[in-house]
Amino acid sequence: MNEYKFILLVFLDAAILIGLLGYYIYKSSLNPEGDKSIKNPLRKRFFFLIMLSAVLLILLAITIPKSPYFLFADKPPSKLVFVDAKQFNFIMSYQAINPKNPSAGESIELPVDQPVEFRVTSLDVNHGFGIYNSRAELVTQTQAMPGYVNRLRWEFKEPGTYKILCLEYCGLGHPVMSSSFIVK
Amino acid sequence: MASLSLKKVSSAWIITILTLFICAIVFGILMRLNQGNDIKLSPNGFYTLMTTHGLTMIGIWTVAGMVGIQYLLSRYTTVSAKLNVFALVLTIIGVIMLWISTFVGNFHTGWTFLYPFPFYIAWAKWATPLFLWSLAVLGIGWFVWSVGILVEILKKYSLKQAFAWQHLSKKDPEVTTPPFILIATVSLVGIILCLITAVILLILFFAEYYSNGSFKNDPLLMKNLTYFFGHTLANEALYLGVALLYELLPEVSGRPKFKMTWYIALAWNFTMIFVLTAFFHHMYMDFVQPLGFQMVGQLASYFASIPAAAVSALSVIFLVYGNKIKWSLTNILFFIGVIGWMIGGIGAVIDATISNNIVLHNTLWVPAHFHTYNAMGNVLFCLAFFWWVANEFAGSQETTKSHKITIGLMLIGGFGFVLMFYIAGAASVPRRFAFYPNELQIGMTTATWAAFFATLYLIAMLAIIWEIVRKCIRVFYSS
Ligand code: HEM
Ligand SMILES: [Cu+2]
């Protein structure tokens, strides 16, 4: 099962569980026989909160190291790609782009299984830089903000054509703002 | 007790809020139909609807909570109906200005109006200042209102008591703070901080606008300010709704009032702090943001949820489980609202995990989770209050109607509508796309289904709103 389905399934399971629990509690209030109400609520609440905090702390410890800021940080990138976003296209080049006279270089081809780095900025408003694989799954992303350069490192595991979509709303052309590159 | 003038202005508020709500739902359905390729709006049409929908919805469901707080506060201390009228007048003026800037001026930056987007003018020139001024009018009105309500609380309770600090050190303090007062105080303080930030943000915008560009802002700072204001306001709005639940749910269920305990006091004081730094999760994908903020973002997002949500959910479970409850529409709405809040909270925690955010940031997962705890959470809390207060106005809480069909439609429509967002979000479909590229076919299919479910939700809302408004109108004829 892939990551996307996994996230959805975890969520749906939790949601259904909460829904069923709600229904069960509601039912218990319709015709209670005898006194079934919960004893010692304070102690039970304390216990539950401690458990919940523990679960969240464990989740923090597992997930934080997987943050994008730490990914491939110690591997020097084999290729650099400069990206300047503007309403409503992406300018990409292996060389640094002159903001006064921005122009794209040759079309981008990246090596498979090697870390590459995108240096992403914007020439006007905020944009997003979302990389989609050939199955239209979002692989990774960063924001394109004027005046700042976000460095996104990634290692592509699969060869193919990757599509870029803008993932920050930037105006009327936002849904058609796209580009692509090849991984071989 | 609520004076007649407070009743009248509350009625006027409720009618205004619910009218705007119906319009905003219709805008939402039109957006979904367009995304499903069932109707054809121009991009300009779509994005003006999106901007109006987002700001109107957040606005009305924040003030809805404030209306409820002020009304119920009249049980504890004297409240000023004039303050309430003042806020209503400024809100109506602000909303009219806002809608003119979007629908006539075509202003369409989305609710975020991220700097420098408002200055890249693709609409009528006058729409940018009108839009910013409309927010200023709304901000000033709500700022005065929330400060006023806080002052009203402080007439009866000292600051320490309003935060229930005496419950942290003593087991049985002489003065007990009702949970309603604590949660209202905590939320109002948060709202005041948001509004101060909004004013700073607007001043920075105006400085650049009126200096004709000789003063330039910093995009990273502006983004942080925007999300601090927007995220925190949306959260505090929900907590206002929760305060209404604490006050009314036991009462209408025929159960003893919630008592303040050191747990509840601690939980809400914690929430006040954590909720103020959770907004950093909006900027996970801005890698230039200091790393420490990113870590704080995930930590605070997790621990903003525990105290408030878990403590409240447990309180409700203990109240209901195994006890004979007199169910009416009021407590049913509160109860379903808690379930919606929890489910939306799970969606939020998943998205607030940085390693998931890489593939969820700015996908439809984001509207998925916040629509869950708004449309199926806070909206229901506030509607529960509206329903209860309308019956107060009419003089009786007794109704023989069971509302089974209405509740069924609301459940299927509401949860079906948000489920479509979750499915599309997990399938990488971006948010804020007026239409989807061909490879994201699933975005279109889910959008059409969502429009269908949202229509069911709208029908249920119309049925509830109709009865509320009918009873509210009668208040104007009473003396
Ligand atoms: C059934 C009722 C509703 C429908 C059909 C609806 C529909 C929509 C749609 C289609 C979008 C745009 C999604 C996208 O990014 O592609 C949206 C955005 C939004 N909605 Fe709703 N919505 C509903 C209820 C609510 C409620 C109750 C609230 C808040 C209390 C709300 C607040 C927002 C906000 C803040 C946005 C973001 C706007 C932006 O991106 O600038 N909506 N809604
Ligand atoms: Cu864009």
Image (cartoon, coloured by chain):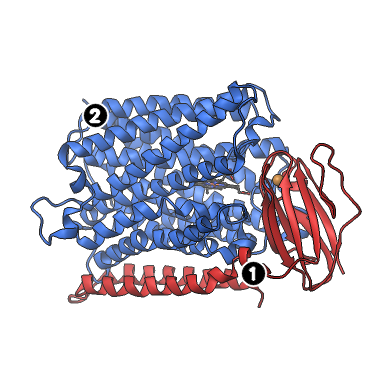
Q: Is residue B419 left or right of residue B137?
A: right
Query: Chain ID for label 2?
Result: B
Q: Is residue B314 left or right of residue B50?
A: left
User: Is residue B334 positioned above or below B131 on the image?
Assistant: below
Give the quadrant of residue B445: bottom right
Residue drawn at x 49%, y 57% is B297
Residue drawn at x 54%, y 61% is B351
Q: Are marks 1 and 2 on the same chain?
A: no
Task: Please give the residue where the numbered disc 2 appears in the rendered image.
Answer: B80
User: Is residue A19 positioned above or below A119 on the image?
Assistant: below
Residue B438 - label: none
Q: Badge 1: few (under 14), some or many (20 or more) residues near its Cα, within 10 Å? A: some
Residue drawn at x 29%, y 46% is B184
- Image quarter in which the N terminus of chain B is found: top left
Residue closest to the eye, B230 or B388: B230
Under mark 1, the amino acid is: Tyr
Q: In the structure shown, which secondary structural element does the residue marked by tag 2 occupy?
A: loop
Residue B238 in percent (x, y) is at 39, 49
- Image quarter in which the C terminus of chain B is found: top left
Residue closest to the eye, B297 or B129: B297
Chain B as rendered: colour: blue
Task: Please give the residue where the numbered disc 1 appears in the rendered image.
Answer: A4
- Kindly indicate which chain is depicted in red in the rendered structure: A
* Mark 1 vs 2: CB contact within 8 A: no
Q: In the structure shown, which secondary structural element does the residue marked by tag 1 occupy?
A: helix
Under mark 2, the amino acid is: Ser
Count all numbered tags in the image, as a single digit: 2
Q: Is residue B337 left or right of residue A180?
A: left
Q: Badge 2: few (under 14), some or many (20 or more) residues near its Cα, within 10 Å? A: some
